[in-house]
Image (spheres, grey):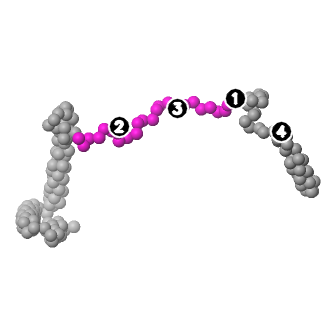
Amino acid sequence: MPLPYLFSFGGFYGIISSSMSFPPHLPDQVYEFAAGVKAALYSFFHKAVELGKKLMERLPPEKRRPALMVSIGAFAVLVLVLAGIPLLTRGKSAERKSAVAPTAGNISEQQGVIPSDDLFLPDEPDFVPGVILGREQRTMWTDADAAPLWQDPLKNGEEPWRNRIEKTIDEIMESVP
């Protein structure tokens, strides 16, 4: 990739100009502010590109690529440090806030906090109940045990029905070869 392409500003300016569009119903002050921000960004990056070109022209051709890599690495480290500072300070401020007891002054900060016991189901017990592989069979049924499960057909005068059913069953069994 040629070095002049790396320092070309047209592509970046296209990103800035296309990302700074606003809906038509906003007041004119917003458009004026956006135009000022756009001009400031354009001049800043244009000056940075010009400075980069001048610095690259001063370097011998064999040192341009390593210098470019070092500058990109330094910029990446700077971005990571700037992104990491808020993360580190946020954790410390959260610890300080949790150490403060709720009073009338900071109760409004505590109102939106829902306890985790209300949000999640309780943990399941750690023990597993024993498994019953079978039950002990009775050796003999008593009349009291069988009474709910058995009705005697001869008790209510159902003998003719029984004879008729047995006769039908016998006829079917005898007709099958």
Q: CA distance from mark 1 to mark 3?
A: 22 Å
Task: Reply yes or no: does residue 139 show up in magenta.
Answer: no
Q: Is residue 151 left or right of residue 6?
A: right
Residue 75 visible:
yes
Q: Residue at x 19, y 46 (%)?
A: 84
Distance of label 2 from label 1 (alpha carbons): 43 Å
Q: Image height check: is 77 above or below 49?
A: above
Q: Nearer the viewer, mark 3 or mark 2?
A: 2
Amino acid carrying label 2: it is Asp
Q: Which residue is mark 4?
A: 155
Between marks 4 and 1 in the image, the one whose residue lies nearer the viewer: 4
Amino acid type at image mark 1: Glu
Kindly indicate whether the residue at mark 4 contacts the one at mark 3 (C-beta within 8 angstroms): no
N-term mark: 2 or 1: 2
Residue at image mark 1 = 136
Q: Position of residue 143 (x, y in %)?
A: 78, 30
Badge 3 crowding class, 10 Å Cα cut-off, few under 14, some 14 to 19, many 20 or more, is few
Q: Quadrant of residue 148?
A: top right
Residue 22 image point, x, y percent: 16, 68
Separation of disc 3 and disc 4 at Cα? Answer: 50 Å
Residue 175's spot in the image, x, y percent? 92, 57
Quadrant into which the C terminus falls: bottom right
Residue placed furthest toward the front: 157
Q: Which mark is residue 117?
A: 2
Q: Which residue is mark 3?
A: 128
Location of residue 95 with respect to 59 vertically, above or below: above
Q: Are marks 3 and 2 in contact (CB under 8 Å)?
A: no
Q: Which residues are magenta?
A: 111-135
Helix, strand or loop at label 3? It is: loop
